[in-house]
Amino acid sequence: MTGQETRNKLTDYWAGHDIKKGDEYVILTNIIHQEWAEVSVRAHMDLKGLQTQNLRDHMSEAELIFTALAELSTRQIAESVEAVGMPENSSAAKVGGRIAKKARLELEEKTGRKVVSGESYLPLSNMANPRYTLDMPNHVSLSGETVCEPPAIPVDQSNLFSAAQAAP
Protein backbone atom coordinates (compact mmCIF):
# COMPACT_ATOMS: atom_id res chain seq x y z
CA MET A 1 0.00 0.00 0.00
CA THR A 2 1.31 3.45 -0.85
CA GLY A 3 1.31 6.53 1.33
CA GLN A 4 -1.38 8.03 -0.90
CA GLU A 5 -3.66 5.03 -0.32
CA THR A 6 -3.10 5.43 3.43
CA ARG A 7 -3.99 9.11 3.13
CA ASN A 8 -7.11 8.30 1.11
CA LYS A 9 -8.31 5.82 3.74
CA LEU A 10 -7.87 8.48 6.42
CA THR A 11 -9.77 11.14 4.46
CA ASP A 12 -12.49 8.59 3.65
CA TYR A 13 -12.82 7.97 7.38
CA TRP A 14 -13.02 11.71 8.05
CA ALA A 15 -15.63 12.18 5.32
CA GLY A 16 -17.89 9.65 7.02
CA HIS A 17 -17.38 11.01 10.53
CA ASP A 18 -18.45 14.66 10.42
CA ILE A 19 -15.21 16.23 9.22
CA LYS A 20 -15.75 18.92 6.59
CA LYS A 21 -13.52 18.78 3.51
CA GLY A 22 -11.25 21.78 3.22
CA ASP A 23 -10.44 23.69 6.39
CA GLU A 24 -11.05 20.81 8.80
CA TYR A 25 -8.93 18.41 6.69
CA VAL A 26 -6.16 21.04 6.68
CA ILE A 27 -6.37 21.51 10.45
CA LEU A 28 -6.25 17.76 11.16
CA THR A 29 -3.44 17.21 8.65
CA ASN A 30 -1.43 19.96 10.31
CA ILE A 31 -2.02 18.46 13.77
CA ILE A 32 -0.73 15.09 12.56
CA HIS A 33 2.28 16.69 10.85
CA GLN A 34 3.13 18.93 13.80
CA GLU A 35 3.04 15.94 16.14
CA TRP A 36 5.26 13.58 14.14
CA ALA A 37 7.65 16.09 12.53
CA GLU A 38 7.65 18.77 15.24
CA VAL A 39 7.11 21.38 12.52
CA SER A 40 3.91 22.54 10.85
CA VAL A 41 3.22 21.74 7.21
CA ARG A 42 3.98 25.39 6.31
CA ALA A 43 7.27 25.36 8.26
CA HIS A 44 8.26 22.09 6.56
CA MET A 45 7.50 23.64 3.15
CA ASP A 46 9.56 26.71 4.09
CA LEU A 47 12.43 24.45 5.18
CA LYS A 48 12.39 22.88 1.70
CA GLY A 49 12.04 26.23 -0.06
CA LEU A 50 8.55 25.44 -1.36
CA GLN A 51 5.85 27.98 -2.00
CA THR A 52 2.78 26.39 -3.58
CA GLN A 53 4.19 23.01 -4.55
CA ASN A 54 2.93 19.77 -3.02
CA LEU A 55 5.06 18.99 0.04
CA ARG A 56 4.73 15.21 -0.43
CA ASP A 57 6.28 15.48 -3.90
CA HIS A 58 9.42 16.89 -2.26
CA MET A 59 9.65 14.59 0.78
CA SER A 60 12.40 12.06 1.27
CA GLU A 61 11.57 8.38 1.53
CA ALA A 62 11.77 8.56 5.33
CA GLU A 63 9.55 11.65 5.53
CA LEU A 64 6.92 9.91 3.39
CA ILE A 65 7.06 6.76 5.50
CA PHE A 66 6.69 8.64 8.78
CA THR A 67 3.83 10.68 7.31
CA ALA A 68 2.12 7.44 6.29
CA LEU A 69 2.74 5.91 9.73
CA ALA A 70 1.25 8.98 11.41
CA GLU A 71 -1.81 8.90 9.14
CA LEU A 72 -2.30 5.14 9.49
CA SER A 73 -2.01 5.40 13.28
CA THR A 74 -4.45 8.32 13.32
CA ARG A 75 -7.05 6.40 11.29
CA GLN A 76 -6.74 3.21 13.31
CA ILE A 77 -7.05 5.12 16.59
CA ALA A 78 -10.04 7.09 15.28
CA GLU A 79 -11.68 3.83 14.17
CA SER A 80 -11.01 2.13 17.49
CA VAL A 81 -12.69 4.91 19.48
CA GLU A 82 -15.25 5.64 16.76
CA ALA A 83 -14.17 9.29 16.62
CA VAL A 84 -16.77 11.70 15.26
CA GLY A 85 -16.32 15.44 14.71
CA MET A 86 -13.33 17.70 15.17
CA PRO A 87 -12.63 17.30 18.91
CA GLU A 88 -12.48 13.49 18.81
CA ASN A 89 -10.59 13.35 15.49
CA SER A 90 -8.16 16.03 16.72
CA SER A 91 -7.35 13.82 19.71
CA ALA A 92 -6.81 10.83 17.42
CA ALA A 93 -4.59 12.97 15.17
CA LYS A 94 -2.39 13.99 18.10
CA VAL A 95 -1.98 10.41 19.32
CA GLY A 96 -1.36 9.07 15.79
CA GLY A 97 1.26 11.73 15.15
CA ARG A 98 2.97 11.01 18.47
CA ILE A 99 3.31 7.33 17.58
CA ALA A 100 5.20 8.27 14.41
CA LYS A 101 7.25 10.83 16.36
CA LYS A 102 8.47 8.15 18.78
CA ALA A 103 9.56 5.98 15.85
CA ARG A 104 11.24 8.96 14.14
CA LEU A 105 13.18 9.89 17.26
CA GLU A 106 14.37 6.33 17.72
CA LEU A 107 15.54 6.13 14.11
CA GLU A 108 17.32 9.47 14.42
CA GLU A 109 19.03 8.29 17.60
CA LYS A 110 20.22 5.06 15.96
CA THR A 111 21.38 6.66 12.69
CA GLY A 112 22.55 10.06 13.89
CA ARG A 113 20.62 11.64 10.99
CA LYS A 114 17.56 13.89 11.06
CA VAL A 115 14.49 12.66 9.18
CA VAL A 116 12.90 16.07 8.63
CA SER A 117 15.17 18.07 6.38
CA GLY A 118 15.37 20.85 3.85
CA GLU A 119 16.40 18.43 1.14
CA SER A 120 13.92 18.27 -1.70
CA TYR A 121 13.23 15.12 -3.70
CA LEU A 122 12.29 17.08 -6.84
CA PRO A 123 14.44 19.90 -8.22
CA LEU A 124 12.95 23.25 -7.23
CA SER A 125 14.02 25.10 -10.37
CA ASN A 126 11.72 22.98 -12.53
CA MET A 127 8.90 23.15 -9.99
CA ALA A 128 8.58 26.95 -9.91
CA ASN A 129 6.14 26.41 -12.74
CA PRO A 130 5.27 22.74 -13.19
CA ARG A 131 4.37 23.29 -16.86
CA TYR A 132 8.00 23.19 -18.00
CA THR A 133 8.43 20.93 -21.01
CA LEU A 134 11.34 20.36 -23.32
CA ASP A 135 10.60 22.12 -26.60
CA MET A 136 13.80 21.74 -28.63
CA PRO A 137 17.48 21.33 -27.79
CA ASN A 138 18.56 23.87 -25.16
CA HIS A 139 15.14 25.52 -25.05
CA VAL A 140 12.34 25.26 -22.55
CA SER A 141 8.70 25.96 -23.31
CA LEU A 142 6.92 27.62 -20.41
CA SER A 143 3.19 27.83 -21.11
CA GLY A 144 3.87 28.50 -24.78
CA GLU A 145 6.79 30.90 -24.35
CA THR A 146 10.19 29.78 -25.56
CA VAL A 147 12.97 30.57 -23.12
CA CYS A 148 16.56 30.24 -24.27
CA GLU A 149 17.83 28.54 -21.12
CA PRO A 150 18.77 24.91 -20.68
CA PRO A 151 16.74 22.86 -18.21
CA ALA A 152 18.04 22.87 -14.63
CA ILE A 153 18.71 19.14 -14.87
CA PRO A 154 21.04 18.00 -17.65
CA VAL A 155 19.09 16.03 -20.24
CA ASP A 156 20.74 13.65 -22.69
CA GLN A 157 18.88 15.02 -25.69
CA SER A 158 20.43 12.52 -28.12
CA ASN A 159 18.19 9.79 -26.66
CA LEU A 160 15.19 11.99 -25.99
CA PHE A 161 13.13 10.86 -28.95
CA SER A 162 14.75 7.47 -29.65
CA ALA A 163 11.78 5.48 -28.31
CA ALA A 164 9.31 7.48 -30.41
CA GLN A 165 11.44 7.10 -33.55
CA ALA A 166 11.81 3.36 -33.01
CA ALA A 167 8.03 2.81 -32.83
CA PRO A 168 6.42 1.43 -36.05
Image: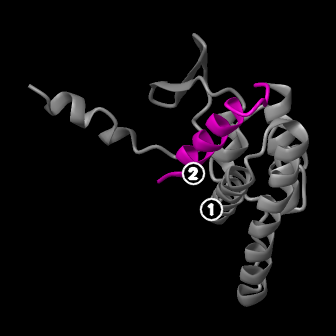
Residue 16 place in picture, x, y as percent: 67, 31
Residue 69 place in picture, x, y as percent: 66, 61
- Quick one: label 1, few (<14), some, or many (20+) residues within 10 Å? some
Q: Is residue 148 magenta?
A: no
Q: Is residue 7 magenta?
A: yes
* Left or right placement of residue 60 versus residue 153 in this view: right
Instruction: Identify the residue at image location x=76%, y=80%.
Output: 108
Residue type at tag 1: Ile
* Left or right placement of residue 154 versus residue 126 in this view: left
Q: Which mark is residue 3?
A: 2
Numbered-mark total: 2
Instruction: Identify the residue at image location x=82%, y=66%.
Output: 98
Is 62 placed above or below 94 here?
Answer: below
Judging by the rendered image, the residue that carries numbered circle 1 is 65
Q: Which mark is residue 116?
A: none
> Magenta span covers which residues?
1-21
Residue type at tag 2: Gly
Q: Secondary structure at mark 1?
A: helix
On-image quarter of the C terminus: top left
